[in-house]
Image (spheres, rainbow, N blue to C red):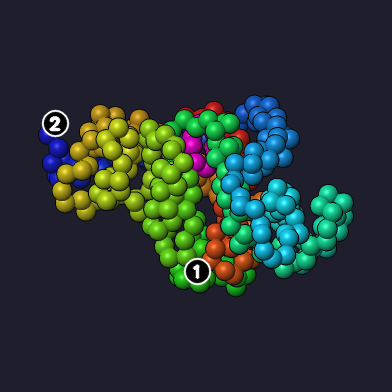
């Protein structure tokens, strides 16, 4: 059957009917036994976290400090302190009080201002990035990805779900590319401008770390020719075009696969729901509010959330 605009719109109607028939009331039993077994992976990651931190710091080339006051803490201790503060998930002042108990671990007292400066420390941010990559390499990613975006408020007065003005200084956009097999983020982007800007940064990070991309699932906001052209033809894209589609062009391969089996196409497309599950877990662990005010520190806070997501990621019955 030849692909035309008319046949494509008919295909989209078939797709809507298929959703109603096969996916509307779909339910599955959750394998709690397997989930308990997979929790051992999380314990192992946490057990090896100091080792990963050491490796992440060790590969950073640092010039010998010749001038100025010597640092209060070495870089490895800084990173461990930052991780501990994020685990506590408290304001800097409350974290300062809580750290009095852990003072013997670091050998020095740190103020809430010192804690806040860790978010802007370039060496800490580089070590966190290295740690992110080390975790991914250790687990291994399948290359079958899904992507979606969410937002975090910078104030308790604004809520991402109820406030339609999700831009500017009120919200920070976060976009994640998640691996279906492991449930880990392989790329993420943070932006105060738009979800599209966050998506572009996530794709750039994905390519920068050299992650494999075999397939990708995105919602209709990203159903554009511009997105299709961002990836070569070896990547299987699961996108659903908008109903006002006017030309086939770049959509040819996607529509051909959709026409061959609408049910199989939708089954793959709906794997992107794992993104919402990931966001729910992240916000449950760290909340939906970013306490930092400077943009670079907001990015560090949200990137660390992505890092901890990978530490706690458990994927049951992938694909």
Front-lying residue, 279 or 47: 47
Magenta range is 177-186
Mark nearer the N terminus (1 vs 2): 2
Q: Secondary structure at mark 1?
A: loop
Question: Residue sitting at 39 percent across and 53 percent down?
Answer: 200
Front-lying residue, 1 or 236: 236
Question: Residue sitting at 49 percent across and 37 percent down?
Answer: 179
Q: Is residue 49 magenta?
A: no
Within-10-Å neighbours for mark 2: few <14, some 14–19, many 20+: few
Residue 306 visible from this viewpoint: no
Q: CA distance from mark 1 to mark 2?
A: 45 Å
Tell me, for residue 163, which label it has, or none: 1
* Residue 237 x %, y %: 33, 38
Relative to 131, is 15 on the left or the right? left
Residue 44 visible from this viewpoint: yes
Q: Secondary structure at mark 2?
A: loop
Within the image, what quadrant is residue 270 found in? top left
Compared to residue 296, the image places residue 308 above or below, namely above
Within the image, what quadrant is residue 159 found in? bottom right
* Residue 260 x %, y %: 25, 29
Tell me, for residue 270, which label it has, or none: none
Question: Residue sitting at 16 percent across and 51 percent down?
Answer: 246
Task: Give the position of the N terminus as an image quadrant.
Answer: top left
Q: Give the residue number, with chain letter if any, for mark 2.
A: 1
Relative to 171, is 78 on the left or the right? right
* Residue 81 x %, y %: 73, 53
Q: Is residue 181 magenta?
A: yes
Relative to 30, is 99 on the left or the right? right
């Amino acid at each position: 059957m030849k692909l035309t605009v008319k046949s494509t719109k008919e295909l989209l109607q078939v797709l809507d009917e298929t959703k109603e028939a096969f996916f509307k009331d779909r339910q599955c039993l959750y394998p709690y036994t397997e989930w308990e077994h997979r929790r051992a992976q999380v314990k192992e990651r946490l057990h090896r976290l100091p080792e990963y931190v050491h490796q992440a710091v060790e590969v950073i080339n640092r010039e010998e400090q010749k001038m100025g006051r010597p640092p209060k803490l070495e870089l490895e201790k800084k990173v461990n302190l930052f991780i501990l503060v994020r685990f506590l998930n408290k304001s800097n002042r409350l974290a300062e009080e809580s750290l009095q108990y852990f003072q013997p671990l670091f050998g020095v007292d740190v103020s809430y201002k010192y804690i806040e400066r860790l978010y802007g420390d370039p060496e800490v941010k580089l070590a966190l990035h290295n740690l992110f990559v080390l975790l991914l390499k250790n687990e291994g990613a399948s290359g079958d990805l899904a992507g979606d975006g969410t937002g975090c408020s910078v104030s308790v007065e604004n809520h991402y779900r109820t406030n339609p003005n999700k831009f500017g200084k009120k919200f920070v956009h976060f976009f994640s590319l998640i691996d279906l097999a492991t449930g880990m983020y392989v790329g993420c982007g943070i932006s105060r401008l738009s979800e599209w800007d966050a998506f572009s940064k996530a794709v750039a990070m994905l390519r920068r770390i050299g992650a494999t991309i075999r397939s990708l699932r995105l919602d209709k906001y990203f159903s554009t020719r511009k997105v299709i052209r961002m990836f070569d033809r070896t990547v299987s894209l699961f996108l659903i075009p908008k109903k006002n589609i006017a030309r086939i062009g770049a959509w040819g391969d996607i529509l051909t696969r959709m026409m061959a089996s609408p049910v199989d196409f939708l089954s793959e497309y709906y794997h992107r729901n794992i993104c919402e599950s990931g966001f729910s877990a992240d916000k449950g662990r760290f909340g939906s509010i970013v306490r930092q005010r400077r943009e670079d520190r907001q990015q560090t806070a949200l990137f660390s959330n992505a890092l901890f997501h990978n530490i706690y990621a458990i994927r049951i019955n992938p694909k």
